[in-house]
Image: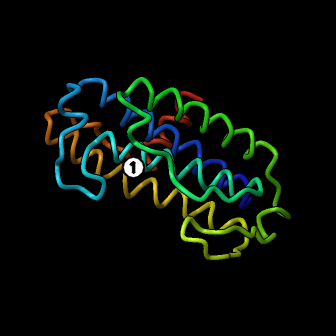
Amino acid sequence: MIVEAIQTLYRYNNWANQRILDTAEKVTDEQLHANVGASYSSLRDTFVHTLSSQWLWLSRWKGSSPRKLLDPAEFPGLAAIRARWAEIEGGTQEFLARLDSDQLGQAINYVTTEGEPRSYPLWQPMLQQINHATQHRSEAAVMLTNFGHSPGDLDFIIYLHRESRDG
């Protein structure tokens, strides 16, 4: 049951990310790069941080420990962000498709970007990644709304209703 719950949360995460990215198609390049005083100064930097974190955790789950996050300068616009995110999401879905309950309890060992060794049962960083994405997606939603383009309701229950209706 826990595997199914995690897989469902990751499908939701992708759905919510896509809603945010689709809404971001409506902003100007200037708005995408504008310093709006958020955790990661701009909408672009917030997107890159969020996708970078997903990539970082996926790498750790697969046994490697990248020592730095992706550089926002490598993503000049939304098309580059979307292309890389699609790759990362594909890798995430492949990982999830092979996930079993035994793996969830096994420790993953990695080194943080600051060089500190860490170890957690897999299920904990998997939920961390979802929670982290929710935080920054919320920040992006506020930025988009302030630019006049609300992404609408991103609640998990809304996703579940749509999935059951459309699925």
Q: Which residue does the image show at 28% across and 58% down from the upper left?
A: 39
Q: Nearer the viewer, residue 124 or 108?
A: 108
Image position of 85 (left or right of 143): right
* Residue 16, x across and y down, in percent: 44, 41
Q: 60 or 166, which lies in front? A: 60
* Position in image of residue 143 (x %, y %): 21, 44
Query: Going by the image, does 7 lie left or right of 24?
Result: right
Residue under label 1, please give it.
155
Residue placed at 71% from the left, 52% from the top?
Answer: 4
Give the SS element for disc 1: loop
- Indicate whether 141 appears above or below 100: above
Which quarter of the picture shows residue 122? bottom right
Question: Quadrant where the N terminus lies?
Answer: bottom right
Exactly how many numbered labels are in the figure?
Answer: 1
Q: On the image, which quarter does residue 22 sit in?
A: top left
Q: Position of residue 6 (x, y in %)?
A: 65, 55
Q: Nearer the viewer, residue 156 or 100?
A: 100
